[in-house]
Image: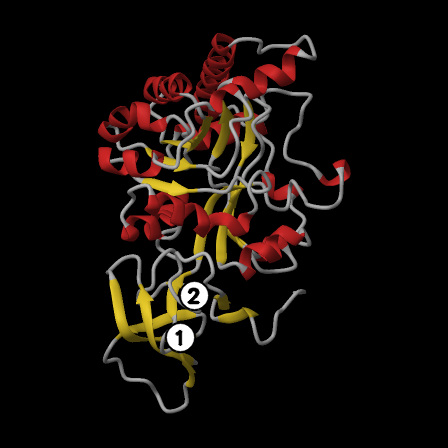
Amino acid sequence: MFAICGGTVYTASAGVLEGASILVHNKKIVAVGSHISIPHEAKIIQAAGKSITPGLVDCHTHLGIAEEAVGDAHVDKNEVNDPISPHLRALDGINPEDPGLHDAYSSGTTTIIVTPGSENVIGGQSVALKTYGNVVDHMILRQPAGIKMAFGENPIKMYMNKNKPPSTRMSIAGMIRETIIKAQSYDKKFRAGNTDRNLRMEALVMMLNGDIPLRAHAHAADDIMTAIRIAEEFNLQLTIEHATAGHKVADELAKRNIAATIGPSITARVKVELKDRTYRTPALMHQAGVKIALITDHPFLPVSSLRIEAALAIREGLPRDIALKAITQNAAEIIGVGDRVGSIEQGKDADLVIFSGDPFELATEVEQVFINGQTVFSTNIRHHHV
């Protein structure tokens, strides 16, 4: 049992509490506030002059499946011989020894989604993880956490070179519709007593039943609308991943309550779909009423850049409280794990970050990180290995 006392607590769910304390016991937050009673046996961590936030949440990464510093042998994010691969699980490609995972928790990011890449039309199943551990099965928060599909130029570039479809956006949409209809037919037969299993179809049936969302890679406004069109045809839960031009169709997303995970923003316009990239996108989409999160898409932007993206969004008009939610509570809710993480409140997992000062200031240092109430990083200890 321990208590973090006297700091500025950014709860994400209930505003900012000055000079407050957080009591942690058995991996959970048991109390938070300015006048909580702290048992005499609790270890005290003095945090006066410091800021405490929930563990940060990055709801779109390729950590562990696009490993750093190892070359092609450990880049497992795309099965580039089969454009329709809903049965693939990101979980099976993750190496928890990826140094990017250390970068994640040491910079305050304690929960992530790891998702297959975007070179297939249907890339497979995402997984939500805590970022600290040496056995990936013990790090899971939600499996699966969505089906990844990709709209736009990435699958076209990959498969035109192989003389296989898709070679157009029409073909991407057509392949998705065909496959979903196959899954509907499979489900109907399965319910009627045909018990021959098909893992590809089972994955899509989870999506059709509303158990997991369609996570649609879509940068351009027209691709976002195609994803919406298909989701409405088949009554699917949808999130838009990247949403680079999401501000152009923000009203369309808002009126349907479709969330957007925006990023990576700190990048050059390296392809046509990024021509509308602007740091104002989060503010514009929030103003339109869209629920937003910010993402790094690691390794395309290092995972440690998450709060820098939030700071840039604040500079361009996103309110500070929404910027915090975009890398904590909103992101956790979009993943589907908001009951466990994303805010500092009683009953949540004790995933906490102590900052030396304002968390949105670039020079502010991450001093201590807790996951499930365990210190996983400290500037005094500097854990580098699990």
Q: Residue 70 vs residue 54: left or right? A: right
Residues at marks 2 and 1 touching, judged by CB atoms closer than 8 Å: yes
Residue at the spot 56% in from the left edge and 72% down from the top edge: 379
Residue found at the very far bottom of the displayed protein: 40
Task: Please indicate whether residue 180 sits to the left or right of residue 260 in the image.
Answer: right
Name the residue: 43% across, 67% down: 355
Where residue 83 sits: x, y (%)? 60, 20
Viewport quadrant of the C terminus: bottom right
Instruction: Determine which of the numbered discs, if any, sits on residue 24 in the image.
Output: 1
Q: Amino acid at mark 2?
A: Leu
In the image, residue 8 lies at what x, y percent?
32, 70
For marks 2 and 1, the one nearer the N-term is: 1
Q: Which residue is mark 2?
A: 352
In the rendered image, which quarter is residue 86 located in?
top right
Q: In the drawing, what numbered circle is on residue 59?
A: none
Lateral position of residue 202 relative to residue 46, left or right: right
Q: Position of residue 125 (x, y in %)?
A: 54, 35
Label 1 neighbourhood size at 10 Å, few (<14), some (14-19), many (20+)?
many
From the top left corner, tell me how far across and down residue 279 is, in percent.
Answer: 39, 37
Q: Is residue 93 among what the camera can see?
A: yes
Q: Nearer the viewer, residue 361 or 289?
A: 361
Q: Which one is in front, 214 or 326? A: 326
Residue at (47% x, 8% y) in the render: 170
Amino acid on which disc 1 is placed: Val
| Residue 129 seen | no
Q: Is residue 215 above or below residue 184?
A: below
Quarter residue 261 falls in: top left
Q: Is residue 117 above or below residue 128?
A: above
* Inter-mark Cα distance, 2 to 1: 10 Å
Q: Secondary structure at mark 2?
A: strand
| Residue 197 as seen in the image, left or right of residue 341 | right
